[in-house]
Amino acid sequence: MTFIGPGRLYRECLPAAFLLLAAGAAFAQVNPASYPMRDESGLAEATATLPADDAILDMAPGELSLVFPENVRLVKLTLRDENRAWVEINFRYNPRPRRDYVWRLPDLPPAVYYTADWAILSAREQLIHGSFSFAFGPGAQAPSLIREAEELFLQQRAGTDPDTRYVAPPPTRIIINRDPPRFDPPFTIELDAEEPC
C-alpha cells in the first residue's frame, strides 16, 4: 500500500485537474455548437422577398422569390401555415450559388397566414437562417398582428410572468372508433403455481 502525503498529492494531482479544467473551458469557447452563429454579414436583413414579410395579398401567390445581395447557396426552403402544417413545395437543393431564387407554389388553401423559412450558405460557408410571413384573401390580417394577439391571449390565460415565453400548443388529432393497439408480452406469468422449496 502506498501512502500519498499532502505535498505529493498537490504536486501530482492538482496540475492534472487544472489541465482538465482548462481544456474544458477552451472546448466551450472553440466548439461552435456551444453557441448560435450570428449573421455578422447582414445578409438576412438585406434579403428581399416576394411576398414581402408581413404582407397582405388579395390572392394566393403563385411563387416565392428571394433576392440576396451576393451569390449564396439556398439549402432550405419550407412553407407552413399558422398551425405549423407543412405545405409540400418540392424544394430541391442546387449546389450552384446564385443571387436570386424563384420557387413555384402549388395552389394554397385558405389559411390565416403562411410562413416561409429559408437557410443559406454564404460565400464564407456561414449558415444563415431567415423567414417571412404573408396572408391573403378577404379579411386577411398582417401575420405579426395575429401572432401578437395569440401571445397576449396566452399571457392573459396563463398569467403575466415576464420571464416566460408562451407558445401555442400544436394541434391535436382525436381518433374515434379505433381500439387501442394490443401488445402481447413475450412471456406468461402463472401466479397460481407453487414455487419449489
Image (spheres, rainbow, N blue to C red):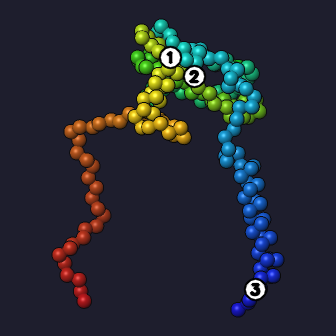
Residue bearing the label numbered 3: 4
Between 170 and 9, which is closer to the camera in this rendering? Answer: 9
Q: Residue at x 23, y 37 (%)?
A: 176
Between 151 and 86, which is closer to the camera in this rendering? Answer: 151
Residue 73 appears in the picture as rendered: yes
Q: Are marks 2 and 3 in contact (CB under 8 Å)?
A: no
Furthest toward the left, the residue is: 192
Residue 86 appears in the picture as rendered: no
Instruction: Say what secondary structure mark 2 lies in.
Output: strand
Q: Residue at x 45, y 33 (%)?
A: 155
Of badges 2 and 1, nearer the viewer stands: 1
**Mark 1 neighbour class, 10 Å CA radius: few under 14, some 14 to 19, many 20 or more:** some
Tag 1 or tag 2, which sits nearer the N-term? 2
Residue bearing the label numbered 2: 132
Q: Residue at x 54, y 27 (%)?
A: 78
Instruction: Say what secondary structure mark 1 lies in.
Output: loop
Q: Which mark is residue 43?
A: none
